[in-house]
Image (cartoon, rainbow, N blue to C red):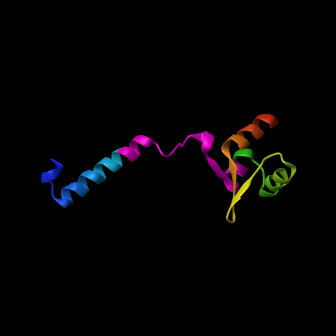
Amino acid sequence: MIENASLDELVSELKTIIKEVIESCDLSSPNESGRLLTRTEASELLNVSFVTLNKWNKQGVLPAFSVGTRVYYKWEDVQDSMKRVA
C-alpha cells in the first residue's frame, strides 16, 4: 500500500495516525506523580500566596526547584504538604 502511495497520500495518512495517537494519550491529564506545577498552580492548589510558598521553600516545608528563571514544585510534594496540613 505505502509503496504505491503518493507523497501527499503518505503525509495525509501520517497526520491521521499522529492525531489518533495524540487523542488516545489523554495529554490533558498527565501522570500526576511526575507532574510539575508552576508557582501559580501550586499557590492556587494550596490557597496561599507566592510569599508563603517562598517562605515554605526556605523552611523546607515545600521544596521547590528552578529551571532557568522559573520555579517549579513537584505534584507529589504539593500533595504531601496538603496532607500534613489537613
- Outermost bottom residue: 69
Tell me: 6 left or right of 62. Answer: left
- Outermost front residue: 3
| Image point (81%, 52%), residue name | 57
The magenta segment is: 21-44
| Image point (30%, 53%), residue name | 15
Residue 39 occupies quadrant: bottom right
- Outermost right residue: 59
Q: Is residue 22 magenta?
A: yes
Tell me: 26 left or right of 59. Answer: left
Total numbered labels placed on residues in the image: 0
Please determine whether, in this image, residue 44 is positioned above or below residue 71. Answer: above
Q: Is residue 7 magenta?
A: no
Which quadrant is home to the C terminus? top right
Front-lying residue, 85 or 9: 9
Task: Measuring from the top left, give residue 2's x and y in whole percent.
Answer: 18, 50
Please determine whether, in this image, residue 49 is positioned above or below residue 81. Answer: below
| Image point (48%, 46%), residue name | 27
Residue 45 occupies quadrant: top right
Residue 65 occupies quadrant: bottom right
Front-lying residue, 52 or 78: 78
Task: Measuring from the top left, give residue 26's x and y in whole percent.
Answer: 46, 42
Task: Measuring from the top left, give residue 38's x and y in whole percent.
Answer: 66, 54
| Image point (65%, 50%), residue name | 37
Task: Measuring from the top left, give residue 10's x and y in whole percent.
Answer: 22, 55
- Outermost left residue: 4
